[in-house]
Image: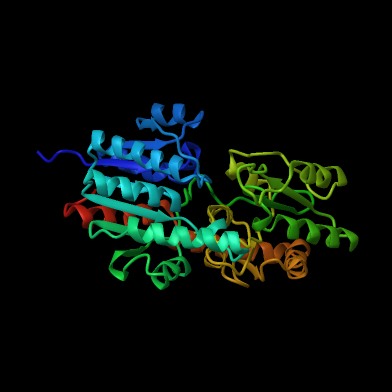
Amino acid sequence: MTAPISLCFLETEDWAFQKHRLSLGRAALSAGMDVTLVAPVSDAALKLRAEGFTVIPITLDRTGTNPLKEARTVAEIHRIYRTLKPDVVHHLSVKAALHGSIAARLAGVPAIVNSITGLGYAFIPGDRKRRALQGVITTSLKFALSSKRLRVIFQNEDDQQVFLDRGIVRRDQCVLVRGSGVDTTRFASTPEPTGVPTIVLASRLLWDKGVGELVEAARILRAEGLAFRVVLAGVPDSANPNSIPAEVLAGWVAEGVVENPGYVEDVAALLREAHIACLPSAYREGLPLFLLEAAASGRPSVTSDMPGCRDAVVHGETGFIVPARDAHALTDALRKLIVDPALRARMGASGRERVLAHFADERVIRGIFDVYAALLGRTVA
């Protein structure tokens, strides 16, 4: 009898695994795999352990750059991999890919899989300090990912091309699997709620997520006399230098231009009470789960012409794509949806159909299992 596959995920936060990769983990458990999550732990670890996952805590600073601390983290991951002896390790972010791939190569792990879920802050053009950081990350990734037993899963073609252009990966290492998967039963299409149109943005509250442009657009539309609500579902990220200060957010709420319920765990319920989803990001996203969940819920979206974001929306069909950092273009797109419920309904229905065809959990999980199978040389159910 063939021994079960031992699969180990490495993530920068346990709650991120719970939010973005729970369906994949559950499918692995259902397929008979032994599944371990290695991550910094929070309350999410209790829920994950209750579902049958082994959770091993580590110290990993997702924004840290201190060489000594980062080296200690790699050593810690290496010790875990040597002890577990997993058949497959799957790293779920750029930082997890960097640290985990080095540790896995040193530990002799047979199959190494890395998911690039967006290039984020470090790959946004910026000042000399940010360019220097990009150079260090690029050089480090070239070393970490130079293994024949390694594959890199990209969520969009733009990110894949960046890695190819910079020589970080070879073409034969690349696999395109779009998104992290959407639970299309939980995120089901429902009729719009009554009341004034509600625009929802659910994300970490960073300037690069386009939150400032959304606030500016809301002010313009209110000055025109339109009735609507803007809900920012999220909190500032103090570990990110691009975070919106708490006092700025409080000022917007006091002004009445936005509402801020804080972090919302039940995004499906949030979208049922919404009319429009909005993520005008200037950030290099992978394939924003929030936009796909909105589409699965039958809600149109307004997003930016940025990698990942433009892959989640079909302009004029499931929503609108506007230039990044352009509050006036964002205003025009939101206006069209606020005043036209028939347009919202038509775009929402098209978005739902597109998610069912391309982004549902089953399709994404199958694509990832196929990567495991190719590296292991055995069937993965």
Q: Nearer the viewer, residue 130 or 56?
A: 130
Give the quadrant of the N terminus. top left
Quadrant for residue 342, please give it: bottom right
Q: Residue placed at 58% from the left, 63% from the top?
A: 124
The x, y position of residue 184, in whole percent, is: 48, 50
Relative placement, left or right, of 275 versus 318 is right
Answer above or below: position of 373 versus 176.
Answer: above
The x, y position of residue 324, in whole percent, is: 66, 67
Answer above or below: position of 100 versus 163.
Answer: above
Q: Residue placed at 37% from the left, 69% from the top?
A: 167
Q: Nearer the viewer, residue 12 or 225?
A: 12
Relative placement, left or right, of 286 versus 141 is right
Q: Residue placed at 24% from the left, 43% from the top?
A: 107
Q: Nearer the viewer, residue 51 or 14?
A: 14
Answer above or below: position of 295 versus 66.
Answer: below
The x, y position of residue 360, in whole percent, is: 44, 55
Q: Residue placed at 74% from the left, 70% from the top?
A: 329
Furthest residue toward front:
68
Relative placement, left or right, of 370 versus 216 is left
Residue 123 in view (yes/no): no
Residue 173 in view (yes/no): yes
The x, y position of residue 278, in whole percent, is: 66, 57
